[in-house]
Amino acid sequence: MDLSLFGLALPLALGLAAIGSGLGLGMAVRGAMEAIGRQPEASGKIQTTMIIGCALIEALTIYALVTFFVGLGKL
């Protein structure tokens, strides 16, 4: 394995994970806000579901960050 390519791939992969997470969070919040706008009486349930979904999206980015540091240790 060429370590220079590995060293280049690590930050690029982390950046892609962060961009994907940001886009996913934006889409999730947008959908929740539109749903609350249509049904304000269901805002509690929608908010709870959105928060759980956002936590799962963020967990994927945290896994990418952990993988980055593990890979950095192998350099």
Image (spheres, rainbow, N blue to C red):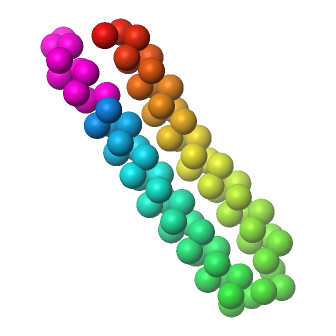
| 47 relative to 62 in the view: left or right | right
Residue lying at the far bottom in this picture: please name it.
38
**In which quadrant of the rendered image does the N terminus lie?**
top left
Residue found 38% across the figure and 37% down from its top? 14
Q: Quadrant of the C terminus?
A: top left
Counting from the top left corner in percent of width and height, residue 2 is at: 16, 13
**Based on the displayed image, in which of its 4 quarters is residue 73 positioned?**
top left
On the rendered structure, is 59 left or right of 40? left
Residue beneath the point at 83% across and 85% down = 41
**Along the horizontal axis of the image, is 54 left or right of 40?**
left
Q: Please give the name of the residue rendered at 83% of the width and 72% of the height, measured from the top-left corner.
A: 44
Residue 37 picture quarter:
bottom right
Is residue 48 placed above or below 52 in the rendered structure?
below
Residue range in magenta is 1-10
Q: Residue at x 22, y 27 (%)?
A: 8
- Please give the count of numbered marks on the rendered protein: 0
- Left or right for 19, reference 29: left
**Residue 13, image x and y in percent?**
33, 36
- The prevailing secondary structure element of the residues shown in magenta is helix
Query: Is 36 rendered above or below residue 17?
Result: below
Q: Position of residue 67 (x, y in %)?
A: 45, 25
- 10 versus 73 height, above or below: below
Where does residue 18 sit, x and y in percent of width and height? 43, 46
Is residue 18 rendered magenta in the image?
no
